[in-house]
Amino acid sequence: MNAPTLHPSLEIRTVDLADAGNCARIEAFIGEHPEATPFHLPQWLRAVARGCRQRGHYLIAERGDGSLAGVLPLTEVRSLLFGRALVSSGFAVGGGILATNPAAVDALSAAAWDMAERLDCPTLELRGGPNPGNEWLVDDDTYLGFARALADDPDAELQAIPRKQRAEVRRSLKFDLDVSVGRDGRHRAAHYAVYAESVRNLGTPVFPARLFRETLDAFGDDADILLVQHEGQGVAAVLSLYWRGCVYPYWGGGTHAARGLRANDRMYFTLMNHARERGCSRFDFGRSKAGTGPAAFKKNWGFEPQPLTYYKRAAKGEAPREINPLDPKYRKKVEAWQKLPLWLANRVGPHISRGLG
């Protein structure tokens, strides 16, 4: 544990993620905070650390009586290709500062920047949360979030989907597709095979298989895989998290055959109903870059896009780390990756993607 940083009425310190007592306190605080996400949880940082070999840190702000006033999960991302950064929260769409008052926001953001300097990370990125101050760059036009309430039953859910997409869902129900939900080795292997092919086709390196295994193990019954098969072959699959009555379909995709079979449509509609049966009342479709096909796909399902606000701070004289496949400088790399044989993409991809953060 690092030495504490003092702040008027607050103590900022780094906690050991292996300490069950501290993790329980953090989870209790997160569980009551209205802006919290599953990406603030200690188990997310532990899964990322084990799955991608990127070290996790956790800052807390304590009042004089020992109660928590704020928390900040951080992942130390190091990559030969993409540089170094301290990210809240690594490999997540959210995870910025959670606090009960402005003093805790100021103290946590200052402590995080001190940590970034000590760790020689020239970029510090906070994904969501309150504005940490004038020294930070604000990005509220790159990413959009998509979330809405689930309907009361499958028929109402179908009617909640706009007409054009509803027709696609109905078409998907006519195909001979086998849908199952599980966490066992069969589901894990099938999910990875489908997801790896899906991201290769998009021109993106696949994450290490261990990241998915560690996430499933860390979240236990609060995570599962929904698998869609056709004639015994996986064609679409998604790994989802369930937290505070909301389902987060986080890592999902489909093979080339999925489009003709409408397998992705079947997958997400089935997941909506599965999540409702699990007691969920909300569906978080995650983030997509503004102006892209994935963003349009989610809007077609009746999800209204909401801008996501991220904050970055860079060391003096340094440009903040920027990893955006839509950037023209990455275009040729994306096109080249799409042409790689799948076996080669799966072998090389994890070594690259663990540094994306």
Image: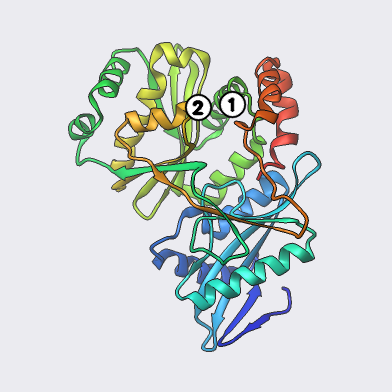
Is 235 situated above or below 245?
Answer: above
User: Does residue 262 appear anywhere in the picture?
Assistant: yes
Is 342 situated above or below 306?
Answer: above
Which part of the image, by quadrant, shows the C terminus?
A: top right
Query: Percent position (x, y) of residue 343?
Result: 71, 19
Asked which quadrant contains residue 135, the reply is bottom right
Q: Nearer the viewer, residue 55 or 313?
A: 313
> Do the residues under discs 1 and 2 have CB atoms within 8 angstroms?
yes
Which part of the image, by quadrant, shows the N terminus?
A: bottom right
Asked which quadrant contains residue 298, the reply is top left
Task: Name the colouring of the figure.
Answer: rainbow
Name the residue type under label 2.
Gly
The label on residue 296 is none
Specify whether 237 is left or right of 282.
Answer: right
The label on residue 253 is 2
Specify whether 343 is left or right of 311.
Answer: right
Query: Percent position (x, y) of residue 125?
Result: 62, 55
Between the residue at mark 1 and the residue at mark 2, the CA separation in whole angstroms equals 8 Å
**Count of marks placed on residues:** 2
Residue positioned 53% across, 59% down in the render: 96
Q: Earlier in the sequence, mark 1 or mark 2?
A: 1
Q: Circle 2: is it few (<14), some (14-19), or many (20+) Cα within 10 Å?
A: many
Q: Secondary structure at mark 1?
A: helix
Badge 1 is on which residue?
199
Residue positioned 23% across, 29% down in the render: 158
Q: Nearer the viewer, residue 208 or 3?
A: 3
Name the residue type under label 1.
Val
